[in-house]
Image (cartoon, rainbow, N blue to C red):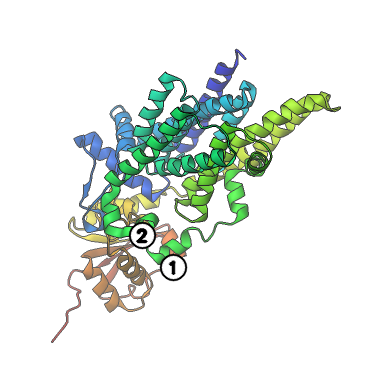
Amino acid sequence: MKLTPFLLGFGCVLVLVLRLWIALSTPTLSTDDAYFHLRQVEHIRNTGLPLFDDPLSYGGRMHVFTPVFHYVVAAGALFMQPVAAAKIIPNILATLLTIVIFGIVSRLSKNEGVALFIAVFSAFVPVWFGHTINTLSPATLAVPLLFFVMYAWLRVSEPRWRYLYLASLILLSFTHPVVLLLVLALILYLVLVLVERLTVERTELEIALFSIFFVLWSQFLLYKKFILTHGPAVVWQNIPPQLLSTLFADVTVLTALYHIGIIPVLYGVFVVYRYLFRRKHKMTYFLIAFALAAGLLLWFRLIPLQLGLILLGMFLLVLFSRWVSFFLDHIPTTRIHRLKPLFIASLVLAFVLTSVLPSLGVAWAVQDQSLSPAGVLAYRWIRDNVPSDAAVVAAVDEGHRVAALGGRKNVIDDHFLLQRDAKQRLHDVNRIFTTTFGVEAVELMDRYNARAILLTPDTKRAHQLSTLAYAIPSKCFGRAFEESGYEIIVKHAYCSVEEIT
């Protein structure tokens, strides 16, 4: 199909325009964690180096992370404002996944029409579309890189692609821990091939073993400090138990289906069943291994929920292409072959209803989490009025905004690794919000040199608050800011708790 490259390019442009239209509809970012990455981008833009030694997070700490994604966004920030780069560059990276999916499905189905169909709709896996538009997530680089590694593997018998595979594997290894999923997938793939008694070429086996050992070595090299500090708890990122139990609590089968898309799930699972128990095909086994790896990591809660759903949805969508190819090849042999255009139109309509519309719904729901003008004013008040050496008490999912927008130390944020007192800090912050005793609140705030408490509408809903019970009226506390559900309660400097002996 000579029109295929043009149609693919046109589809990518439309997807990118739609993404940017939604992302630029608000001047702020939609998640708290995005502001951690924004601080890194701004620091790289200004100094050329990441902010590993962070004076604001937890009142001062060291970060350990790979800054490849931040350098990519910072390169764009050289030509535009950092917030604009944070919206534009990740959406460009996310759109590139469409092209990579096209290549994988082309190799799998040998049908460019099917590849074009799957590639375009891969942009509308709801959890991918909605949670990568305005969140400045490293996943927008890591996921396309992972799929490019998969595509290069499918062509690893060609010398040029062998080198491209190794180069992309090295880049992914130093970009995101999601590369560990590749290790599990390769192990599962080799097991499936051996169980089915299919031939494993020597080149394929050597590259698979090299990939497994290189990835494990590189991840230990990068994150050995985490491993030595936390031991097995590093798997769950040292998240406090009281918070970890809530991360997957609201996820049901229906929620997962909505965020992945019901058609890829149903027919993707059908393809997995068909090829595991009835047919043999090495390339399909390779993709099934990735779907099984993502499913296992999700089942055992070893991967962040959104990232796990993104990967599982994409893998099942690619596997769904096998069903589409089978359907298009089989229907001409039936008596209803004249209805083929109608079936194709019905399939497109079903995807629009179950994937495109939910994608837009998730995207706008995430956009609604962006800071309101009142929220911007609240953080601006913190920057202008809270002493520079003081901390601000805020919910765990507001900590990065306190550091990035308020420019002040937070007591806690959601980066728990290397923080041995994360559990205690989370307990103390929750007590400051819920206690009815001002003396206890003063004591806890003094422990972290905190001078202000930030109450957002989300914090009030989470703790069922209208305001702090001990603060109004109080000789030690005063309301310094209030607008549209945002409140800032300040603790007067002369109030403290001393132990008298």
Vertical relation: 384 (above or below) 497: above
> Would you name the residue on which mark 2 appears?
233
Relative to 427, is 59 on the left or the right? left
Residue type at mark 1?
His
Locate residue 353: give its quadrant.
Answer: top right
Give x and y (percent) for residue 284: 59, 34
Residue type at mark 2?
Ala
Which numbered marker is on residue 15? none
Mark 2 Cα shell of 10 Å, populated few (<14), some (14-19), many (≥20): few
Q: Answer whether labels 1 and 2 touch (C-beta < 8 Å).
A: no
Mark 1 Cα shell of 10 Å, populated few (<14), some (14-19), many (≥20): few
Marks 1 and 2: which is nearer the front?
Answer: 2
Q: Residue at x 20, y 52 (%)?
A: 55
Closer to us: 324 or 460:
324
- Regarding residue 145, the answer to whether it shows in the image is no
The Cα–Cα distance between marks 1 and 2, rounded to whole angstroms, is: 27 Å
Q: Helix, strand, or loop for circle 2?
A: helix
Give x and y (percent) for residue 294: 51, 46
The quarter of the picture where the N terminus appears is top right
Q: Residue at x 32, y 57 (%)?
A: 416
Give x and y (percent) for residue 315: 55, 39
Give x and y (percent) for residue 439: 27, 78
Locate residue 267: give its quadrant.
Answer: top right
Which numbered marker is on residue 463? 1
Can you name the residue that lies furthest to the top here? 2
Locate residue 286: give its quadrant.
Answer: top right
Q: Helix, strand, or loop for circle 1?
A: helix
Relative to 231, is 448 on the left or the right? left
Vertical relation: 205 (above or below) 59: above
Closer to us: 77 or 351:
351
